[in-house]
Amino acid sequence: MVSILIIYTGGTIGMVHDPKTGTLIPFNFKQIRQNVPELARLNYRLDVHSFDPILDSSNMTPEIWVELALLIRDKYDEFDGFVILHGSDTMAFTASALSFMLQNLSKPVVLTGSQLPIGEIRTDAKENLITALEIAATKNNGKAMIPEVCIYFDYQLFRGNRAIKYNAEKFEAFRSPNYAVLAEAGVNLSFFGNYILPHPEKKIIVHLDLNPNIGVLKLYPGISKQAVLAITEANVDAIIMETFGSGNTTTAEWFLQCLAQAVAKGKLIIDITQCQRGAVELGMYETSKKLQQMGIISGHDMTFEATCTKLMYVLGLNLDQETSIQLMERSLRGELTS
Ligand code: ASP
């Protein structure tokens, strides 16, 4: 019998109406079988691990990602797959972080949640939960169909480090702007094998050292030197620079100097685009040629969420600057197209 561990971290999904007061209160996932009777028909061995306290995912931290990775490491041999119930707000960050922390993953780790609590009549929680479990249980020639960290939401399965929360209102909360969906749930579950990562040849390695000492510099026409210096001179190890179009910035001398000084101090500066689709192409325009010459890293088509968590992971490896740059520019878990 297929075995799946449900890890409940919190989020909107875990709310039900208190029969006494009528208010929404956290749902005890230990009693999940009574409350979601459909689960009995799945014929899987399900175990539940509930976080204590449960979280609104806006309070997610790298320390909790370490807790999640440790839990998966400890239970890795016991279960065929893992379904993490998580608030949608930072789900894409958690999925991205776990994708880097769990190297050589050969089992599915599917994150899901919902826009309406599981106790609401019109809830999207039951479909999301049941299909996420089905995806986590699906095998192909005796091996897991999806050896990846992914997000299942509103009938679509996304690679975790390619997804972004796109809509705060609609059931279709997530999108993967630069990568195809991995599966779709209609009358049948359709998996798109060409887009799914291959099975690793080596054993899983769980990385637990994350360095979140990162700054963010979002550009806009008219940005002041003072605003730029506040980030480039801050005590951070890396800076994510959100630029225009295919990675362009102003070519004002003072601006380029601020960047050059930060690079000279050993900070990693990675260029990602403010556009939702498309990629950074350093050197395509004169405005980005200078960045390339200065040693600014191309983030290619990575999401902000993937860039941020990948930096935490790469900085946590404590490598020399050149190797860190190489890792940032290369696809490690299918997070970028170069
Ligand atoms: N604020 C909630 C959370 O992220 C929203 C949700 O679950 O959808 O935990």
Image (spheres, rainbow, N blue to C red):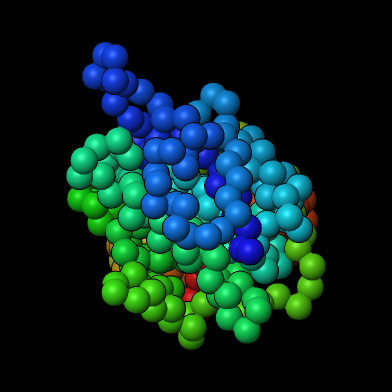
Residue 177 lies in quadrant? bottom left
Residue 47, picture quadrant: top right
Q: Toward which corner of the image does residue 211 lie, by quadrant?
A: top right
Q: How many marks?
A: 0
> Image point 67% across, 69% down: which residue?
106
Q: Front-most of 196 and 207?
A: 196
Quadrant for the N terminus, please.
Answer: bottom right
* 197 vs 15: above or below: below
Please state the horizontal and vertical placement of residue 244, each as a whole percent of the image: 32, 61
Q: Is residue 315 visible?
A: no
- Residue 192 seen in render: yes
At x 38%, y 74%, the residue is 189
Q: Residue at image x 39%, y 78%?
A: 190
Q: Position of residue 300 (x, y in %)?
A: 47, 70
Q: Residue at x 65, y 76 (%)?
A: 143
Q: Position of residue 214 (x, y in %)?
A: 56, 42
Q: Is residue 94 above or below residue 274?
A: above
